[in-house]
Image (cartoon, grey):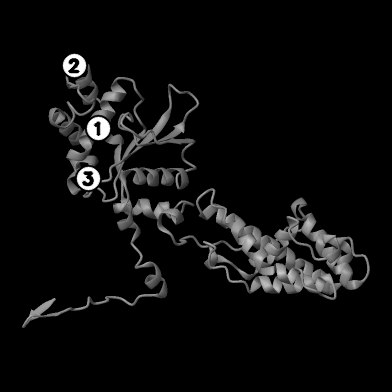
Amino acid sequence: MNQEDGLVEIIEPEVKSKLSNTDLLLGIPIEPIKRLQVISHDDFEDFVREWVCGYLKEKYIKVRRPGGAGDKGRDVVAFLTYDDRKNVIWDNYQCKHYNSALSASDILIELGKLCYYSFKGAYSVPRKYYFVSPKGISTKLAELIDDSEELKKQLILKWNKNCRSKIISGENIELVGELLFYVENFDFSIINDIDPQVLIEQHSETRYFFYRFGGIQKTRPEPVKPPMNINDNEMLYIRKLLKAYSDHHKSNIDEINKLKNHTEYYNHFNRQRKSFYSADSLMMFERDTLPPGLNAINDLKEEVLDGIIDTVESEFDDAFKRVKEVCKVARSLNTPSYPLNSSIKGNDLAGLCHHLANEDEICWVVEEYD
């Protein structure tokens, strides 16, 4: 802002990069690493738990987030074994959501809790103990973690300042006698850290990433091909297709084997099965990509039904023509509200018509509505 002779000149800010239509509507996207730095501490713990439950799900059999003031220095607990409650094997992910990189002074109290509570038998010593922070750790702390003996020395040296009165409110925990002996013999090589960028990249492979950051990072696999044998869950829509062919041919085609005598029907039938399984693949991709419980595919089905129902109920010379016209309309539908819209293929929307037929939402032969 310049001021001269009482006049004020407003200088507009420079736009550093070209904005897309999406940017204009929703604002410039925030980088995941920066978004991670501004969420609350509780949300950060949830984020870490999502990562453990999603990306590391093959590694652990049970995950807990004790939370609250009585967590005894455990934020996200992941169990490798849990059958014998007295001899569990577990890892701890200690979440520290600070405005700067973690320093040694930030984590000594957590190590004090780890030593004290495992010494008292509140829980066993974890197999691994990780510090997780959205801004990572300082260089000095990284050096300490890499030198477990020096880390131990610093904890003992600074116990009175960092741990003595802070482990239990209103109580002083003296580092003497058996507790001192325990700390001196504790294996601090179990301590490690998780880089925040690695955390984000691995979280992006879970179904929770879309909920946290928006956008779809995963590439949809190619749709599965229809199996040679007809599955039980296909029978209803297939019976309806056979009735449509019969209506067009003016003769009873009630078995799939009879289709081989009618090239047009046989080829059409195989294309419809391909579409049915393409829609099936979309459902599986959604299940593996979006947060559990979202069930966006049900909303998509309803959207497709709303888009085709007028055509379904229109007059046609025969049911086969109805099938082809309805699937043609479905393929042209625009579904921007579906979270995985960019991953939709033409066969998906046509296939959803057959899924709707399979769920008895639509029929091809008019008499079936009577």
Please tell me which residue is depicted at 19% across the width and 48% down the height of the picture: 139
Q: In this rendered view, identify the residue nearer to me: 115 or 63.
A: 63
Near mark 2 (Cα within 10 A), the count class, few <14, some 14-19 or many ≥20, is few
Q: In this rendered view, identify the residue nearer to me: 145 or 255.
A: 255
- Give the distance between the C-alpha atoms of the residues marked 1 and 2, in whole angstroms: 18 Å
Which numbered disc, 1 or 2, marks the residue that appears first in the sequence? 1
Q: Residue lying at the far front in this picture: please name it.
A: 6
Residue 111: mark? 1
Which numbered disc, 3 or 1, marks the residue that appears first in the sequence? 3
Q: In this rendered view, identify the residue nearer to me: 199 or 95.
A: 95
- Local SS, label 1: helix
Residue hosting label 3: 102
Question: What's the amino acid at mark 3?
Answer: Leu
Please tell me which residue is depicted at 30% across the width and 57% down the height of the picture: 34
Near mark 1 (Cα within 10 A), the count class, few <14, some 14-19 or many ≥20, is many
Residue hosting label 2: 177
Which percent across, then down, holds residue 359? 73, 55
Which quadrant of the structure image shows residue 142? top left
Please tell me which residue is depicted at 29% across the width and 41% down the height of the picture: 192
Q: Against 160, is 130 above or below?
A: below
Q: In this rendered view, identify the residue nearer to me: 152 or 1.
A: 1
Which numbered disc, 3 or 2, marks the residue that appears first in the sequence? 3
Which percent across, then down, holds residue 47? 39, 47
Please tell me which residue is depicted at 26% across the width and 27% down the height of the picture: 115
Residue 318: mark? none
- Give the distance between the C-alpha atoms of the residues marked 3 and 2, in whole angstroms: 31 Å
Which percent across, then down, holds residue 193? 30, 44
Indicate which label's residue lies in the foreground, 3 or 2: 3
